Image: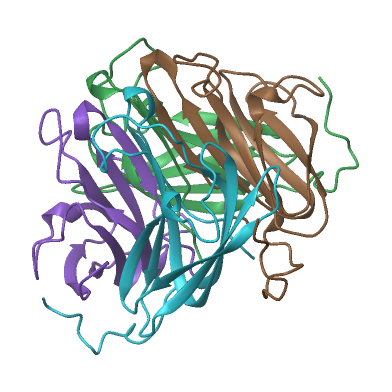
Chain colours: A brown, B green, C purple, D cyan
Amino acid sequence: MAPWSQDSHDAGRALGRRTWVFSAGFAPSQSTGFEPEFTSRNTLCLLNTGQKATCVKLKVYYEEAEPVGPYEILVAAQRVKHQRINDLIEPEAVYLDQPYGLVVESDEPIVAQLYYLDSRNGQLTVSHLNPSALP
Amino acid sequence: MAPWSQDSHDAGRALGRRTWVFSAGFAPSQSTGFEPEFTSRNTLCLLNTGQKATCVKLKVYYEEAEPVGPYEILVAAQRVKHQRINDLIEPEAVYLDQPYGLVVESDEPIVAQLYYLDSRNGQLTVSHLNPSALP
Amino acid sequence: MAPWSQDSHDAGRALGRRTWVFSAGFAPSQSTGFEPEFTSRNTLCLLNTGQKATCVKLKVYYEEAEPVGPYEILVAAQRVKHQRINDLIEPEAVYLDQPYGLVVESDEPIVAQLYYLDSRNGQLTVSHLNPSALP
Amino acid sequence: MAPWSQDSHDAGRALGRRTWVFSAGFAPSQSTGFEPEFTSRNTLCLLNTGQKATCVKLKVYYEEAEPVGPYEILVAAQRVKHQRINDLIEPEAVYLDQPYGLVVESDEPIVAQLYYLDSRNGQLTVSHLNPSALP
């Protein structure tokens, strides 16, 4: 592979922020079509452009229960990590078919976005969502 | 449930802003598929990460009528609330099949995002939308 | 209709910005399903929360032709206006099936978002897009 | 064509930023329907509103491999350029069916957005995504 030239002006700088928030979480439990490509999902897409690995902590908020966390995800230096919310099981599985909110906190600046795939009812729809703009 | 550790550095801090705006509201009246999962909807997704409940007030703007409001939604502390626009009936039902804009104002900082599900015509499509970036 | 109370703290203040930019414009010419509900479209969604009508001017950029404009759209005070790009014909129709970019400029602060409906090939998909974050 | 009047207050000013980041890249290799309209794709939508051509450099991040770049894209003055990620082959083709992140850097301010079309499994879904909000 051809590595990015070391004199690029972004070398060593981690892009992004340390706190991100989503309010529109909803992960359908139903799916149609082949697995795993077409399994309905919410995928948290994390990018660490920095030179150090970072520990990302998630806190999940519900409508009628106390928030749960931290969920911990390690993102290596100079790597992207696409984490399915459905696969988070420690400290407990994230509820499916329930509205949820998400606070993402990281030791180092990162970029976070959400990928939503819904294959219920013999259909396929995809959406992307940025976290909320924070002041 | 495992509560988020009390020494987390976001404890007690409410994330977000007190004013949010959307211009792209449009709630189709038609749906196909089972109810309520596949009922076409615009869902306003509110997250209150703070320690106090907050009263959220909505003002709805139309193309050819005076704005209507306030619609009031209570969001408890440390909770998410996914409110279907279609269910707002006081002071009056929000018009379906009509373009609308939305101003969201809250006593405390919150995060607001829109979830759009459209099941017209035997189809299923979902989209997410952040409010506009305000200066 | 129940008007928004005149002592609301946003009264008289126009929310938003005077300049917005989109780079991802693409309006398919093909459609399936009943018209006009399912006609493929790019809809520019403008909200004027202020007390004065505003003139919004659009400039359209292409891949292989000079930019075209201004397209002018009047948005009344306290109104939303959902303008189909496909209906802009003066100074000339916006090209369909071609990538385009859009600069939106307004006399008064407004909010702008894009609604995309694509019904090509017997399908239905909707997406929403905010303008780019400007410094 | 009717050119934008030269006394417009944006004349000569390039709108946007020089650095943009996406974390939610994923380009499906499978497609259904006629080509090229319905070929699944990730399209990077670049707009250069300035008076000078600009060289845009991309760096692609993966989950389990070193980042690759720079990919170079020339965007002429006053032009939009919609670049399919699938067509980037120098220094090497971008992996399909793999999560990726993207850093976009430009000599001059530009606007960048992502257009996602997915036609797998006899379906059609489109989504748009802004780059992450950077501080």
Q: Is residue C58 left or right of residue A129?
A: left
Identity of the residue furthest to the bottom in this view:
D7
Image vertical order of residue B25 relative to residue A6, above or below? above
Q: Is residue D124 above or below residue A5?
A: above
Q: Quadrant of residue B81?
A: top right
Residue, far top: B34
Q: Is residue A77 above or below residue D71?
A: above
Would you identify the image quadrant in which residue C121 lies? top left
Query: Is A100 in front, or is B55?
Result: A100
Q: Estimate the x, y position of residue A105 in percent, counting from the top left.
A: 76, 46
User: Residue at image x 20%, y 52%?
Assistant: C97
Image location (x, y in percent) of residue A106: 78, 49
Given the current orientation, which residue lies at the most extreme right position?
B7
Quadrant in the picture for residue A127: top left
Residue found 68% across the figure and 43% down from its top: D63
Residue C9 coordinates in the image, percent (x, y)? 49, 58
User: In this view of the protein, can residue C14 be seen by the observer?
Assistant: no
What quarter of the picture does the N terminus of chain C occupy? top left
The residue closer to the viewer here, C9 or A93, is A93
Q: Position of residue D89 (x, y in %)?
A: 48, 56
Residue drawn at (62%, 56%) of the image: A134
- Residue D84 seen by the camera: yes
Taking the spot 31% from the left edge, 64% from the top edge, the residue there is C101
Q: Out of C13 and C125, give the one closest to the viewer.
A: C125
Q: How many marks?
A: 0
